[in-house]
Image: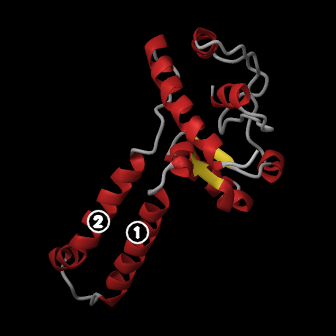
Amino acid sequence: MAEAILKSKANFEVQSAGIAAMTGQPTNPKAIDTLKANQIDFSGQSQQLDSELVDWADLILTMTNHHKQAITSHFSAGIDKVFTLKEYTSDDADETWQALKATYLKLEEKRASISENSTKEEIEACLSEEIAEIRRLEEKLRDLDIVDPFGQNLEAYQQAYQEINSAIDKLIEKLPE
């Protein structure tokens, strides 16, 4: 749906691809119905993400952090151009990512300084502040996911459409034509 919404609003060269997509499959009928209900005519076929598409893209936007992680783990060449859609359009997401990286670094530094003779309880007590902060930051980043409506009812597709549409409006403001 994101490809269709973006193409309906701006003149960008866009391709949609899935991590586990079966190339050549028709677009989900519920997605097509949702797009039609919002005056967007779209018919397309799925394609699987491959290294050629990753190389072609200037920017790769995913709906979820899970998808982002899957792409960056399989296609290291694209690691610097993969974002969730909401992350890329959010003003504070970069700050959250930087804070998360810094907290992980602090955790690893503390872990390295812990004595081998420390008990499990002592280790947990030493690292508890960083672990709590990591959980808090990761939860904040989860709010940057757009829930995948696949396998759900038409209402779930409409909700996903609204989320994607709103994020794409922000994306268009952010990107040069």
Residue 99 shows which numbered tag? 1
The residue pinned by badge 2 equals 133
Left or right: residue 66 versus residue 13 is left
Q: Residue flagged by tag 2: what amino acid is it?
A: Glu
Badge 1: how crowded within 10 Å, few (<14), some, or many (20+)? some
Marks 2, 1: nearer the viewer: 1
Badge 2: how crowded within 10 Å, few (<14), some, or many (20+)? some
Could you say which is closer to the camera, residue 170 or residue 116? 170
Give me the residue at 40% from left, 72% from top: 104
**157 up-or-down from 112: above or below:** above
Secondary structure state at the residue bearing disc 2: helix
Could you say which is closer to the camera, residue 131 or residue 136? 136
**Position of the N terminus by quadrant:** top right
Left or right: residue 136 versus residue 89 is left
**51 up-or-down from 129: above or below:** above
Sooner in the amino-acid sequence: mark 2 or mark 1: 1
Left or right: residue 140 versus residue 12 is left
Picture coordinates of residue 43 (x, y %)?
75, 15
Picture coordinates of residue 36 (x, y %)?
63, 10
Picture coordinates of residue 24 (x, y %)?
79, 23
User: Answer yes or no: do the residues labelled 2 and 1 have beta carbons within 8 Å?
Assistant: yes
